[in-house]
């Protein structure tokens, strides 16, 4: 029997890392008959202590110590922990050589579990939307800008690029020459704002190149190979939020998103400007396609990302340490 105490120094529900991996996870644990509390004070009744990331850990006698998504470069910390909870395969693989007990719990937003997905209709203006950290918008220079401008300037689509984030200060690369609207992220209005989108985009990869590898055909290495660069904390969170709201998605080739978007019936995974343009063009011209894809993706999300099933697996993993 495990009793879990989460230790935090920031319980701001607007902070995604707290909301999903502490607030929501604590609820799922209790729903699955695990005694779990956030900052309970007296830890004598708890045999598992899970720290929020960036909090100095304390080693308690006869207690297993875990942490949520720690910094993968802090090797000394990773080696001290009894277990680690991360949000993706990418994150797990970035630190697995320092700790054998790394458990994945995806970014499944509890506050969107009961959202009725959007039903798409014919629209005079197509809203192509983004939500998340504005740092990722710097990746728009890898094809998104060109695709949006081609849709707007050459094909004449009445589109608007709508962005939901806390600030645009971190978007320092070139902006696309299309109408852009900024919506400040607010937990009270975020859901209704996302539902106004017709298409969702997920930029994440910060660099890619074709070829420029030494041609070693005997090893299966060719000049046509693709080299990608993405953060170790890459995860499926932004994609799941779009899917929960019934918004069809075009994403880059970030690994976690391919779990669903590897099937083109569920959405589009692309890499370069032509890929972004082709997918966005198809979705812009057909509201029925937007409905079909968003429904397929929603059904796949419901099949693969039931938070209670993931919680049961997490409980078993912690019990088996």
Image (cartoon, grey):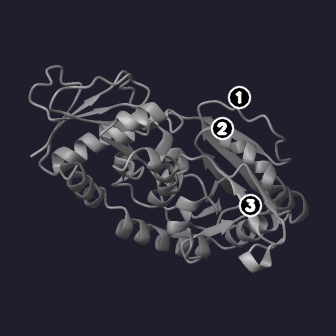
Looking at the image, residue 81 sits to the left or right of residue 284; the answer is: left
The residue tagged 1 is: 169
Q: Is residue 188 visible?
A: no
Element under label 1? loop
Residue located at (10% from left, 25% from top): 44
Residue at image location 50% in from the left, 68% down from the top: 260
Q: Is residue 41 left or right of residue 94?
A: left
Total residue callouts: 3
- Label 1 near label 3: C-beta < 8 Å? no
Q: Quadrant of residue 124?
A: bottom right
The image shows residue 308 at horizontal and vertical percentages of: 25, 57
Q: For numbered disc 2, what is the local secondary structure?
A: helix
Q: CA distance from mark 3 to mark 1?
A: 29 Å
Q: Tell me the distance, in whole angstroms, between the alpha carbons under discs 2 and 1.
A: 7 Å
- Measuring 85% from the left and 57% from the top, which residue is drawn there? 146
Marking on residue 134: 2
Q: Earlier in the sequence, mark 3 or mark 1?
A: 1
Write down the residue under mark 3: 227
Regarding residue 17, the answer to whether it shows in the image is yes
Confirm or deny contact between disc 2 and disc 1 (CB under 8 A).
Answer: yes
Above or below — where is 304 with respect to 3? below
Viewer-side residue, 266 vs 269: 269
Q: Sort mark 1 into few (<14), some (14-19) or many (20+) by Cα contacts within 10 Å.
A: few
User: Based on the displayed image, in which of its 4 quarters is residue 117 positioned?
Assistant: bottom left
x, y percentage for residue 224? 82, 72
Foreground tag (2 vs 3): 3
Q: Residues within 10 Å of mark 3 (few under 14, many from 20)?
A: few
Residue 36, image x, y percentages: 18, 37
Q: Position of residue 144 (x, y in %)?
A: 77, 55
């Amino acid at each position: 029997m495990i009793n879990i105490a989460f230790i935090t120094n920031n319980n701001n529900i607007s902070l995604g890392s707290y909301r999903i991996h502490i607030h929501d996870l604590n609820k799922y644990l209790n729903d699955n008959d695990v005694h779990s509390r956030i900052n309970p004070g007296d830890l004598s009744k708890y045999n598992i202590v899970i720290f929020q990331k960036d909090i100095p850990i304390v080693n308690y006698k006869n207690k297993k110590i875990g942490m949520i998504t720690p910094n993968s470069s802090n090797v000394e910390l990773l080696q001290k922990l009894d277990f680690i909870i991360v949000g993706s395969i990418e994150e797990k693989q970035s630190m697995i050589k320092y700790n054998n007990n790394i458990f994945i719990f995806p970014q499944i937003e509890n506050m969107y579990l009961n959202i009725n997905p959007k039903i798409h209709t014919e629209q005079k203006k197509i809203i192509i939307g983004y939500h998340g950290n504005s740092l990722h918008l710097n990746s728009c220079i890898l094809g998104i800008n060109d695709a949006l401008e081609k849709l707007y300037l050459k094909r004449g689509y009445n589109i608007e690029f709508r962005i939901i984030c806390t600030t645009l200060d971190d978007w320092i690369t070139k902006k696309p020459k299309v109408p852009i609207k900024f919506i400040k992220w607010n937990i009270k209005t975020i859901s209704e704002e996302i539902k106004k989108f017709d298409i969702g985009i997920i930029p994440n990869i910060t660099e890619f190149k074709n070829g420029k590898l030494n041609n070693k055909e005997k090893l299966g290495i060719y000049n046509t190979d693709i080299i990608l660069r993405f953060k170790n904390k890459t995860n499926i969170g932004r994609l799941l939020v779009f899917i929960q709201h019934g918004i069809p998605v075009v994403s880059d080739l970030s690994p976690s998103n391919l779990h669903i978007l590897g099937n083109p019936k569920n959405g589009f995974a692309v890499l370069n400007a032509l890929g972004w343009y082709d997918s966005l063009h198809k979705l812009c011209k057909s509201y029925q396609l937007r409905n079909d894809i968003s429904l397929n993706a929603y059904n796949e999300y419901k099949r693969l990302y039931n938070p209670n099933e993931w919680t049961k697996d997490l409980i078993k993993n912690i019990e088996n340490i």
